[in-house]
Image: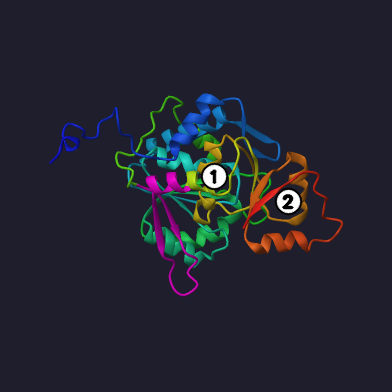
Amino acid sequence: MNDYDKNLDKNKANFVPLTPITFLERTKDIYPNYESVIYKKRVFTWKQTYDRCVKFASALEKHGIKLGDTVSIIAPNIPELFEAHYSVPMTGAVLNAINTRLDSKTVGYILNHGDTKALIVDRQFHDVVKKAIEGLNRKILIIDIDDKQADLKDAGKFGEFEYESFLNEGDINYVWKRPKDEWQAISLNYTSGTTGNPKGVVYHHRGSYLMATGSATAWNMPNRLNFLYTVPMFHCNGWCYPWTLAMLHARVICIRNIRAKEIFDLIEEHKVTHFGGAPIILNMLASAPKEEQKPLKHKVYVLT
């Protein structure tokens, strides 16, 4: 043992477990009034987003969610899914974002295999969820998202709570839980099960923190970019960008339905500087009818 191995143990003054939740906390403190999440006529600031996440985390804990529990969510790219990337791990629980394109049998398998304790669900997907939970041998907490942009022709009231009313049960002074170990799980994702049952993949706080920072460096992303969220947030946590974008105090433009005309419209309306997506998205834009396309008036960076 040499001198460097003596009296230099980890302590609160020299070591803090890495977690991407701190990106939101920092941006709230430094840029509280900057716009954070934009979805149609709903516009939040970073302070508002932080407060909403804290209150939702508090409400989850009041309803029994604790360290190591799985909280699932089925929703498109809307503010509630973005917020879940912070509110759920703020309780010490693990976020499980489920592919909205899966059938009820596959969703049921994921809910059972992941031992889901609570499910946040956009009402448009109620039909799938109702069938999925029939095979569960336990009761889970269900929270509805009532999005006015959703197709609700076949949806009814299903959850015990509605997202906004549930959020308002929370305490804005709730002290969220930092991980005691950065190896602690932050999210649980599943493959789509094309060759059998879906396989679960666990992200830890450290890996998510490093992926979020690495993405910004790899793409040379600037501070305060305007990001159109076309990558599904259920896909590898949207490439970990919910955390990257908070770190960069970006403007996050949500899009519920991936349609060429809406993408072109949002790029123009919000002066989008960056978006990402699979090649099929780029092909859709390139092949869109001329009346749906709009010439780009500024440079837009695309990652695929």
Of callouts 1 and 2, the N-terminal one: 1
Graded by Cα atoms within 10 Å as few (under 14), some (14 to 19) or many (20 or more), the crowding at tag 1 reads some
Question: Which mark's residue is nearer the viewer, 1 or 2?
Answer: 1
Q: Residue at x 44, y 27 (%)?
A: 171
From the top left corner, tell me how far across and down residue 267 is, in percent: 74, 45
Whether the magenta-drawn stretch holds residue 205 is answered as: yes
Q: Nearer the viewer, residue 139 or 227?
A: 227
Disc 2 marks a residue whose amino acid type is: Ile
Tell me the distance, in whole angstroms, between the alpha carbons under discs 1 and 2. Answer: 22 Å
Q: Could you say which quadrant of the image residue 9 lies in? A: top left
Q: Residue at x 72, y 63 (%)?
A: 283
Q: Residue furthest bottom?
A: 195
User: Answer yes or no: do the residues labelled 1 and 2 have beta carbons within 8 Å?
Assistant: no
Q: Residue furthest right?
A: 291
Residue 51 seen in this snapshot:
no
- In what element is the residue under mark 1? helix
From the top left corner, tell me how far across and down residue 79 is, in percent: 59, 41
Residue pointed to by mark 1: 216
Residue 57 seen in this snapshot:
yes
From the top left corner, tell me how far across and down residue 286 is, in percent: 77, 61
Q: Nearer the viewer, residue 251 or 74?
A: 251
Disc 1 marks a residue whose amino acid type is: Ala
Residue pointed to by mark 2: 263
Highlighted range, magenta = 185-211
